[in-house]
Amino acid sequence: MNGDLSDCIPTVNLYRTDPPPPAFSSGFNYRYTRLFYQDVAGTMTESRNLYKAYGYRVTVVVSGTGNIFSIVTLATKVGSGLALVSIAAVVVGMLISC
């Protein structure tokens, strides 16, 4: 936030969460249902669809270091926020009184 862009060097790690290929089945296998209501001959009937999702599940982990805390930056941002709220209150008060 306060540093140079060249100082920002995040690291990205990718991990497979499924077992290695000699397992029963490789990749990600998952079944889920969606329930819905359907009009059949004038009556609402509950139905469901069964979906099978398969592929590779990948977890992305991004890590890095944050910037140091600055009381000056905090005071500036809080002060500007309060100023905007007070300006908005004045404008709304003027609009209501008209």
Image (cartoon, helix red, strand yellow):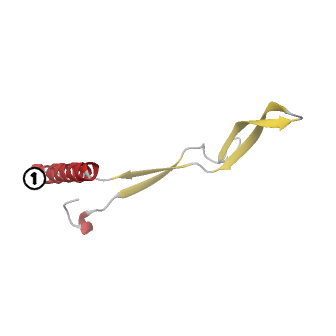
The 10 Å Cα crowd at callout 1, few under 14, some 14 to 19, many 20 or more, is few
Could you say which is closer to the camera, residue 49 or residue 6? 49
Taking the view exactly as shown, the residue that stands out farthest to the left is: 72
Question: Could you tell me which residue is drawn at 43 percent across and 54 percent down?
Answer: 13
Taking the view exactly as shown, the residue that stands out farthest to the front is: 98
Image quadrant holding the N terminus, namely bottom left
Q: Position of residue 85 (x, y in %)?
A: 22, 49
Q: Position of residue 67 (x, y in %)?
A: 21, 53
Could you say which is closer to the camera, residue 77 or residue 54? 77
Question: Could you tell me which residue is drawn at 61 percent across and 51 percent down?
Answer: 56
Q: Seen in the image, is 58 located left or right of residue 46?
A: left
Camera sees residue 30: yes
Which quadrant holds residue 40?
A: top right
Q: Position of residue 26 (x, y in %)?
A: 67, 47
Q: Seen in the image, is 96 located left or right of residue 18?
A: left
Taking the view exactly as shown, the residue that stands out farthest to the bottom is: 6
Q: Amino acid at mark 1?
A: Val
Local secondary structure at mark 1: helix
Q: Position of residue 80 (x, y in %)?
A: 17, 54
Could you say which is closer to the camera, residue 75 or residue 80? 80
Question: Could you tell me which residue is drawn at 58 percent across and 48 percent down?
Answer: 57
Q: Is residue 15 above or below residue 30?
A: below
Camera sees residue 23: no
Could you say which is closer to the camera, residue 92 or residue 38? 92
Name the residue carrying label 1: 72
